[in-house]
Amino acid sequence: MKAVQDLCDRGEPLDTIMPLVQADPALAAEILDGPLGLRMDQAIKRGAARRRELITLMRPYLAALDPAVKRELTVARRLLVHLIEHRDLGELVDGDVLTKVVAAAAEPSKRLRKGLRWYADLPLRDELAPDLYRLRRADLVPVTQIDDLVWKDGRLLVRGHAYLAGLSVRSRRFNRATVVLRGPRWLPPVRMRTRRVYAPEATHAAREPGCNYDWSGFTAELSAWPLLWRGGLRGLVSAVRRRMRHRPAVRDATTWRAEIVFWSRGARATGLLRGAAVGRTERPAGLRVKQGLWVRPVWTSDRALQVVLQPNRAELTGVEFDGERLQLKILLPGRSVTKGHARLGGHRMAAEFTPGAEGTTVTVGLAVPSLLQEKDGRRLWIEPKGDPAASVMLGDAAEMRATSGDREIAVLADRRDRVVVSAHRIRPVLTSAVWEGPELVLRGSYPDAAGPRTLTLRHRSGLTYTAPLERSGEDFTVRLKPGTMPRFGESVPLAAGTWNMTVRHPAGEIVPVRMDHAALAGLDEDPRTVGGHAYRMVSTRFDVPVVLSEEVRPADEKGVAGTHVLRRVFYPAQRTEPLTDATVYAVNDGRLYADSVRAIYEERLRRGDDREHIWVVKDGAFVPPGPATVVRAGSREHHAALARSRHIVTNAFLPAWFRSREDQVVVQTWHGTPLKHIGNDQPHMTRDPRPPVWHRQAAEVRGWDLMLSQSPWATPVLRQAFGYKGEVLESGLPRNDALNGPEAERRAAAIRARLGLVEGKRVVLYAPTWRDYDRKNAMVKLDLARARESLGADHEILVRAHPMQAMPAVPDIAHDVTTYPDMADLLLITDVLVTDYSSSMFDFAATGRPIVLYAYDLAKYSTKRGLYLDLAAQAPGPVLSTSADVVDALRSIDSVASEYADRYATFRALYAPKDDGKATARVVDHLFPS
């Protein structure tokens, strides 16, 4: 399956994929409904030749396929398979039958009910057998989520939502659901008392546009008694069986899986109850029904809910630590055992068994030096001779953390109360997280060596923020303002997503922060709204503290359903309204206030242009200066602005749903003169059939009315790369006016102060581009330690990775400016640029300052991506392949610059002839002559 998926993702030809598909008939349904099905849809939409090839390859395969497999496919795939197998080849190739089916399947399909059966409303329904359109198990997909899981008055309360994908649930009528617990096969199931409730959040989170799941919410209640008698009955049967084998009876756990049974408007389906909401629901508490016997809701590795009746066969009663040895005492209640072993993870070890009045006490000794060599926490087991192994439970014992040098020995419980022994670097442990207005105050314990430490908040994209730990002995406090986080002298909100917490140890190790288990019950996980974001401080995966950030959106803009209405209903309606004399500005989908778009906006403000200016802002990334109106990316106002504004100025592609109107003017400034191949010149864009991105680009480019070019050399390159046939203005790039403008010195001083750079020091900027084939590599290829040692204290080193590359791991000897919003500002203060295949080389040439090219993978990059220039012959500076050579060139940069002066002048005249500080004026004069 994975091999087929990989081939389809790479766009390999169908004749390469089909032999692999035919090799495993057992996976036929999964492949046809998965990667091969998507490839079939692409081939059908791409012309008669592609359809003929598809049908020719698929017919022998489908003829040999088991009819039962074809019958259980999803309805759209079942219909396509039937047509490919039975319709005339010429009709399928030259007609539009297959295209209509694929187009209809991509839209929210109507469901039709005849009697007690449901059918899909797809093309050819009047011509083909009704059985082809019947919704079967593959179409009735249960979607579930558990939002709360708590004990109240001895009863387990489950709250969440559950529905069948594509079947709206608009009211309580004809809408029932029952949560059922199914245990061992011969035990009767437990039916929980379940009722439907109103849950509009289910509609907001749905993936199916056009469906309403407002009444898909449910609450279910469970008393412990049905589990107790069923568990007792199973225990009795198990005891009899063991006695018949002359073995003593052993109490064992009984597990029930949670399922939900639907009766929705005549459709019936059953599915596992799965999907815990982040936070408290991930760590449900257990209920002690009597001494040593618990009922615990638990989550499996695939996020399915189970309920376990669990006897504590081994309980921790004490922990002793003397620095050299960790001693654990465990009680086996009601058992008299004299022999056995203990096991820590996979390591078996000796243990001392001492029978007593209450049971057997087991003493386990662990050598601290051996523990310190372990990397992961391990569960503790007791293996009494003749009995199954028993997991040691924490019970009423206290958890323990003890330090040994800069390491920590921990005896803790996991989310199921099982004892885990671990040794690791001393970790900060949060004991409280309290909101004081817009400020989140974290307090905890960190018994590491004294000294300054900083807490790092890290986003999955690699973006980070730091905050100091205010330490007082072993205690610490951290104060965060998620709505106004500092970034290069300005304040921005935490971007939407999950922010993990770590502390960097002076030794360089990244130490994770954890929650104190005793504080979990009282942790406030309710959201706090600050500005346009809602923030939650939660503990996920049991004891991992994270901050969750989410943009506040109106209910009708949430989820796929909201965006579907905006794009298919609201936006087309707005396009029929008269245009307003407004200009929309968008940089990288609204992520930045930067580039040539910024320069054009500021020039218009300087001229006193009082027409309406609208900036698209994603995730609160910036606040533009001046009188501009801000619209949130993806919002109703964003759709209206793009539908009704006369001018649109952007530096990249606009949203896929945007279509330019006849009387609109779309200005594409693009983000630099390309050195590496872009657009249609990239290898994957020439494949047959064309990849989806080729069609996406073609539709986008058709809407452009004006493209800016930095030079006469760049114009034909851009035309060819994008297939653009419209007007090109060879104005130079407005963003580069900042490098030569009259305000350059004043602006440079302000930028240096913003970055904390010492005035008078030479600034070296290392700004490599991204690698398509190595995007997740966060390594900085330039040897920064050697550069710092060689260049000395009179140099400042800046590192800026490409936004498409993983965030770099930059040590403290250099400044990480990857997230600085405007590259033009960085080039303005840079004295020497070190780059590779980045367009910044063309921009920086306007300054006349030295350029060094660190092309350590020139041969590989030229082959895989392709370059427009012969760097060895045309580059404005030395092209070097090792970090040592780059450092040597930087150390003698004046002589290097002198050596390459003639080539630099030729390069500048050819590729940046219009970057004279007046490019923005030329663009504004051309676009807005009045």
Image: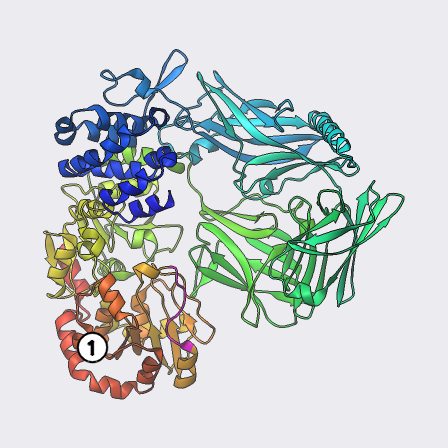
Q: Residue furthest top?
A: 115
Q: Let me know if residue 628 appears in the view.
A: no
What secondary structure is the stretch in magenta mostly built from? Answer: loop
Q: Is residue 256 left or right of residue 608?
A: right
Q: Is residue 780 magenta?
A: yes
Q: Dot 1 surroundings within 10 Å: few (below 14), some, or many (20 or more)?
A: many
**SS assignment at label 1:** loop
User: Which percent across, then down, holds residue 693?
Assistant: 24, 47
Quarter of the N terminus within the rendering: top left
The residue shown at (42%, 34%) is: 206
Q: Quadrant of residue 773?
A: bottom left
In this rendering, the answer to whether 49 lies above or below 864 is above
Between 459 and 104, the one lying in front of the other is 104
Between 227 and 444, the one lying in front of the other is 227
- Residue type at tag 1: Pro
Q: Is residue 416 left or right of residue 340?
A: left
In the picture of the structure, the residue carrying the numbered disc 1 is 876
Between 474 and 254, the one lying in front of the other is 254
User: Which percent across, then down, holds residue 20?
Assistant: 31, 43
Q: Is residue 397 magenta?
A: no
Q: Let me know if residue 547 appears in the view.
A: yes
Q: Quadrant of residue 861?
A: bottom left
User: Which percent across, then down, holds residue 792?
Assistant: 42, 85
User: Which percent across, then down, holds residue 930?
Assistant: 14, 54
The magenta stretch is 776-784
The residue shown at (36%, 50%) is: 618
